[in-house]
Every structure is written in C-alpha cells, then in structure tokens.
Image (cartoon, helix red, strand yellow):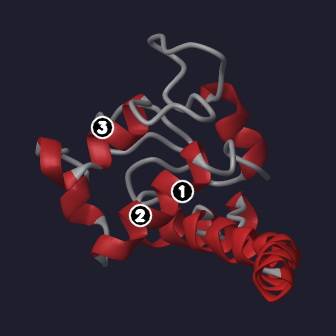
Amino acid sequence: MRLLSSLKFAVVLAAVLLLPACSDVAKDALAPPVTTDRTYTTDIKPIFDRSCIRCHGEEVQNGNIPLNFSSYESIQNYIGDAPSNEVIIVPGLATSFLLIKLDPQYNGIMYKYLDDPEEYNLIYDWIVSNNAAE
C-alpha cells in the first residue's frame, strides 16, 4: 500500500513539474505567424517607383487620377482614419481603396501594372499589418 502511495505521489509530482513545459510548447505551436515590418521607404516606394510613378507621379499624365506616390510625404494626403474621395489608404483596413484597386481577386484594374504578385502582398502587409508606416 505504501508503495502504491509513493508511486501516485511520484506521478503527480512529475505531472506538476512537466506541465508548465508542455504548456509552453502548446503556446508556441499556436502562436500567430510573425510578419515582417514593412516601411514605405524600404518596401513600398520601390514598387511605386517601378509600377505607379509613370502615371501617378508629381505631374498628372494622360488625364490619370492626380495621385502622387513619389514620396512618403506626398502620400500623406491619401492616408486617413476613414475612406473618402481623398483617403485611399486607411492604416489597418484591408478594404482600403488602394488595396481594392490592386487586388487581383476583385479584378483590381491596377494589378496588371505590378511586376510580381508578391508586390500586392507587400503593399497589403504594409497597409494592414504595419499601419502604412514610413
């Protein structure tokens, strides 16, 4: 009987000592994926320079919508708390007008000007996950 009590005690003690280690493993397994910080200067401006500036630069060309993506300061005019005719980038909002225009799933008419499908993902991540950071 005494052996059985000692055995029960040992099992309970092992469970108590090992349980915190198991819970850390479980937490790590369920952790959300780490996203990379995206900034305008490092990640987004090169895309805009290649794909957008030819029509949406400092000067309006061919009657295009007068958006100026040439610098972070110039896009500040298009960033706001809520969508409007002027606000096309709402930090944290997946349905920001710019994202809709670029989204291939919704036949975004500007998507065809991106060089690579990954560029849309970078812009999306910058607006939604990184709140359109400079």
Look at label 3 and name its amino acid.
Answer: Ile
Q: Are marks 3 and 1 in contact (CB under 8 Å)?
A: no
Which of the 4 image quadrants contains residue 132?
A: top right
- Residue 30 is situated, as x and y percent measured from the top left of the image, at 57, 64
Work out how far the residue at label 3 is from the one at label 2, CA to CA, in angstroms. Answer: 12 Å
- The residue shown at (28%, 72%) is 117
Label 2 belongs to which residue? 121
Look at label 1 and name its amino acid.
Answer: Asp
* Residue 41 horizontal side relative to residue 119, left or right: right
Label 1 belongs to which residue? 125
Work out how far the residue at label 3 is from the one at label 1, CA to CA, in angstroms. Answer: 14 Å
Q: How many marks?
A: 3
The N terminus lies in quadrant: bottom right
Look at label 2 and name its amino acid.
Answer: Asn
Label 3 belongs to which residue? 100
Please state which of the two labelled residues, at mark 3 or mark 1, is closer to the viewer: 1
Along the viewing direction, whichever of 34 and 39 lies nearer the viewer: 34
Residue 62 to residue 97: above or below: below
- Residue 134 is situated, as x and y percent measured from the top left of the image, at 79, 52
